[in-house]
Amino acid sequence: MSTDEHAERFTLLRPLLFAIAYEILGSATESDDVLQDSYLRWAEVDLATVRDTKAYLARLVTRQALNALRAGARRREDYVGVWLPEPLLLDEHDASEDLVLAESVSMAMLVVLETLTPDERAVFVLREVFGFDYDEIAPAVGKSAATVRQVAHRAREHVRARRKRFHPAGPARTARVTERFMAAVTTGDMEGLLSLLAPDVTWTADGGGKVITVRRPVVGAEKVAALILGIFRPDLRIERVNCNNTPALAAYNGERLEGVFLADVADGKITQFYAIRNPDKLLALAAPRRISR
């Protein structure tokens, strides 16, 4: 039977628990489901048996997130086009002062995490982002602490090998580039747009087969610029939002959200665009979330 103390402890840790689930799943809506299911299980726990609420709930949420990740594996295999994580709408300054958390929820990092096995992903998130000990992680993934240490090393090397060599720009510089980008697309300034794009800039779109969009990444400044000017039509309303702790653009046709566009910026140039246009994934942007470590 749930008590006020159950609810109080869970609510206090909810931003942390949501962040764990989201980084394992890459989906805000699935993370909500995981937290709801986890709370129902938590409500049946005898609190007298819980020595460390944070570690206990982190293990519980991790197990439920792994179950959801494995259950959804087939859906991702059958997905039409490129699968991208759901964008995460945050309060304007939610994660900005926590650099580790901010980097861990970036679209670039989430895309890298998609290349890990479920166990590697969970171990990496719990260890590298949230700082749990190996013996705390072990019961969450059903492995020994020694095995978890090996999995953590393997996941860390995997992520490091796939990270770009340069350091991404911080939120302030990304915001400045985003402002210039908005000015260029709203005025149809092709030259201004090209000046913001890296020569090998890549456009990756996720429409899920539900909207018309490119199904494979488009590479090259001129190709991407032409694509952008075709998408950002004059009749669209463009708003700047904070998604995954970076300035992003939300495109509206009337009151309907048509897409969210995030960019990676390095050395003053946009190197990667992520265009999330699957309407199912845009539902997660109905309200901002809170995350913490």
Image: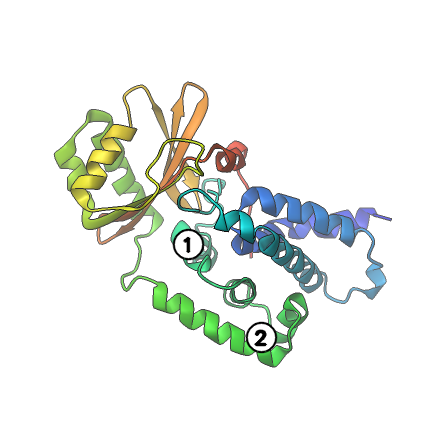
Q: Quadrant of residue 145?
A: bottom right
> Disc 1, disc 2: CB below 8 Å?
no
Q: Amino acid at mark 1?
A: Val
In depth, the one of 134 and 274 nearer the eye is 274
Residue count near mark 2 (Cα–Cα under 10 Å), binned few <14, some 14–19, many ≥20: many
Give the residue pinned by disc 2: 148
Q: What residue sits 45% from the left and 39% below the top?
A: 208
Does 9 sit left or right of 283 as displayed?
right
Q: Quadrant of the C terminus?
A: bottom right
Element type at mark 1: helix
Classify 8 as above or below 60: above
Determine crowd level at label 1: few under 14, some 14-19, many 20+ residues with C-alpha closer than 10 A.
Answer: some
Q: Which residue is mark 1?
A: 111
Tell which circle, 1 or 2, labels the residue nearer the N-terminal end.
1
Colouring used for the render: rainbow
Residue most extreme to the front? 78
Q: Residue at x 49, y 51 (%)?
A: 77
Judge left or right: residue 225 versus residue 155. Answer: left
Q: Is residue 258 left or right of residue 10?
A: left
Distance from disc 1 to disc 2, alpha carbons, whole Å, reads: 22 Å
